[in-house]
Amino acid sequence: MEILDRVGGGDSFASGLIYGLLTEQGLQRAVELGAAHGALAMTTPGDTSMVTYAEVNRLASGGSARVDR
């Protein structure tokens, strides 16, 4: 995975974690969503995540970090 910009990675982790908790997916899954969103957010420039839920879900489920845009 190529890191373009580390800004926003922590915020993206937090938002993925919170999403998982609010949608009652369980703590383990919430952490996986947070980690996936945080990692994918660093593949886009700036502090705004440009990834979709489908991309986050695919990575959190053990899929490739390759993003097709």
Image (cartoon, grey):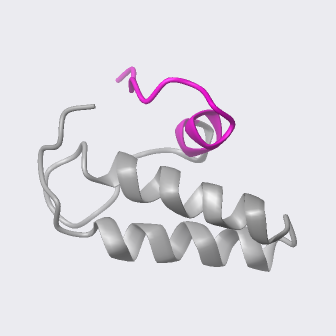
User: Which quadrant does the N terminus fall into?
Assistant: top left
Instruction: Pinpoint residue 10: horizontal percent, then vertical percent.
Output: 34, 73
Verify whether residue 10 appears in magenta. no
Verify whether residue 57 appears in magenta. yes
Of 26 and 23, the residue lying toward us:
26
Instruction: Pinpoint residue 56: horizontal percent, then vertical percent.
Output: 55, 45
Viewed as shown, does residue 18 lie left or right of 29?
left
Q: Which residue appears at 33% of the width and 53% of the height?
A: 41
Vertical order, 61 against 40 (above or below):
above
Whether residue 50 can be seen here = no
Viewed as shown, does residue 58 lie left or right of 48?
right
Q: Which residue appears at 56% of the width and 66% of the height?
A: 16
Highlighted magenta segment, given as a residue range: 55-69
Of 69 and 42, the residue lying toward us:
42
Viewed as shown, does residue 33 lie left or right of 64?
right
Vertical order, 4 against 17 (above or below):
above
Instruction: Pinpoint residue 37: horizontal percent, then vertical percent.
Output: 47, 55
